[in-house]
Image (cartoon, rainbow, N blue to C red):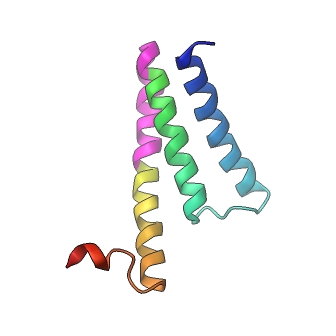
């Protein structure tokens, strides 16, 4: 099986998993696992689209991944503020 095909299938499956888990109420749309799954799936689909030279699909998934990066950072910052400062050790 071609590597790029596997990347595309995995990326789509991960994003669909996040969507399904959210719809079933298992993952909140503000949870780290939901946002991380969207980020990983989005990045895999960006690579897939780039390899196919499917630029509109690449742009769509780049935006998806960038928004997910922001959400992951927000999740980690929020988590850090509740658990004694996740990022404090790097600020010293």
Q: Quadrant of residue 63?
A: top left
Task: Name which residue lies at 54% across and 18% down.
Answer: 3
Q: Is residue 34 left or right of residue 22?
A: left
Task: Name which residue lies at 38% across and 82% down.
Answer: 85
- Highlighted range, magenta: 50-66
With respect to residue 7, does 34 lie above or below? Answer: below
Quadrant the C terminus occupies: bottom left
Task: Name which residue lies at 40% across and 57% down.
Answer: 70
Q: Magenta segment, principal secondary structure? A: helix
With respect to residue 15, does 54 lie above or below? Answer: above
Q: Residue 24, percent across and down?
A: 80, 57
- Nearer-the-camera pick, 25 or 8: 8
Number of labelled discs? 0
Magenta span contains residue 71: no
With respect to residue 61, does 18 lie above or below? Answer: below
Q: Is residue 91 left or right of residue 1?
A: left
Task: Name which residue lies at 67% across and 36% down.
Answer: 13
Quadrant the N terminus occupies: top right
Q: Residue 56, percent across and down?
A: 44, 23
């Amino acid at each position: 099986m071609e590597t790029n095909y596997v990347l595309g299938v995995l990326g789509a499956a991960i994003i669909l998993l996040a969507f399904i888990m959210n719809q079933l109420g298992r993952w909140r749309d503000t949870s780290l696992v939901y946002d991380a799954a969207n980020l990983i799936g989005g990045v895999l689909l960006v690579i897939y689209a780039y390899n196919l030279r499917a630029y509109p699909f690449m742009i769509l998934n780049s935006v998806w991944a960038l928004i997910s990066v922001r959400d992951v950072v927000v999740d980690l910052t929020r988590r850090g503020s509740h658990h004694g400062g996740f990022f404090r050790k790097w600020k010293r």
